[in-house]
Image: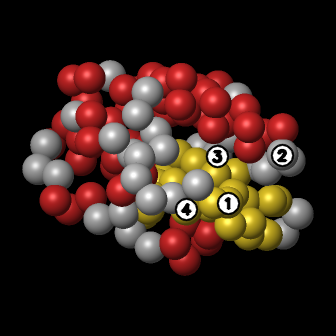
Amino acid sequence: MRIETHRIGQAKVAEIQAEGLVLTSVEDGLSLLGDLYYQGFDKIILHEENIAPEFFDLKTKLAGEVLQKFVQYRMPLAVVGDFSKYTSKSLRDFIYECNQGRQVNFVQELSSALKDL
């Protein structure tokens, strides 16, 4: 796993770049959140391909539990990927609702993530 650092004004943004999965459980999310917070990062960008497929199946509750931690600890998160392949109406609604707020955004491109954060 590699961390690419971006600056948005005074904010220090961590873009996680990795081969394979980085987020497969709530514990992974908390660990990532804590590690990056203590390294002085203010915001996080994750790529869809580094997140377990179960995250995008809302029945597993993984997405809700992980994102709740990011919101609870006030760490903005952007997830970059192509979400059009997911056909679940509930997931599409979930993504839409997340994108209405300022804490968690699902975007298609890195440039959008940097702009939204």
Query: Which label's residue is closer to the chain start, 3 or 1?
Result: 1
Q: Amino acid at mark 4?
A: Gln
- Between the C-alphas of marks 2 and 3, the distance is 15 Å
Return the x and y of residue 107 as percentages of the image width and height: 42, 63
- Between the C-alphas of marks 4 and 3, the distance is 17 Å
Relative to 110, say whether 61 is above or below: above
Number of labelled discs?
A: 4
Contact (Cβ within 8 Å) of mark 1 with mark 4 = yes
Give the label on residue 17, or none: 4
Which residue does the numbered mark 3 point to in the structure image? 76
**Callout 3 crowding tier (Cα within 10 Å): few <14, some 14–19, many ≥20:** some
Q: Nearer the viewer, mark 2 or mark 3?
A: 2
Query: Which label's residue is closer to the chain start, 4 or 3?
Result: 4
- Between the C-alphas of marks 3 and 1, the distance is 16 Å
**Callout 4 crowding tier (Cα within 10 Å): few <14, some 14–19, many ≥20:** some
Return the x and y of residue 42 as percentages of the image width and height: 77, 49
- Between the C-alphas of marks 4 and 2, the distance is 16 Å
Which residue does the numbered mark 1 point to in the structure image? 3
Q: Amino acid at mark 1?
A: Ile
Query: Which label's residue is closer to the chain start, 2 or 3?
Result: 2
Q: Quadrant of the C terminus?
A: bottom right
Callout 4 secondary element: strand
Q: What residue is rendered at 36% in x and 63% in y?
A: 81
Q: Amino acid at mark 2?
A: Gln
Question: Residue 35 or 102: which is nearer the viewer?
Answer: 35
- Between the C-alphas of marks 2 and 1, the distance is 11 Å
Callout 2 secondary element: loop
Callout 1 secondary element: strand
Return the x and y of residue 71 as percentages of the image width and height: 61, 32
**Callout 1 crowding tier (Cα within 10 Å): few <14, some 14–19, many ≥20:** some
Contact (Cβ within 8 Å) of mark 2 with mark 1 = yes
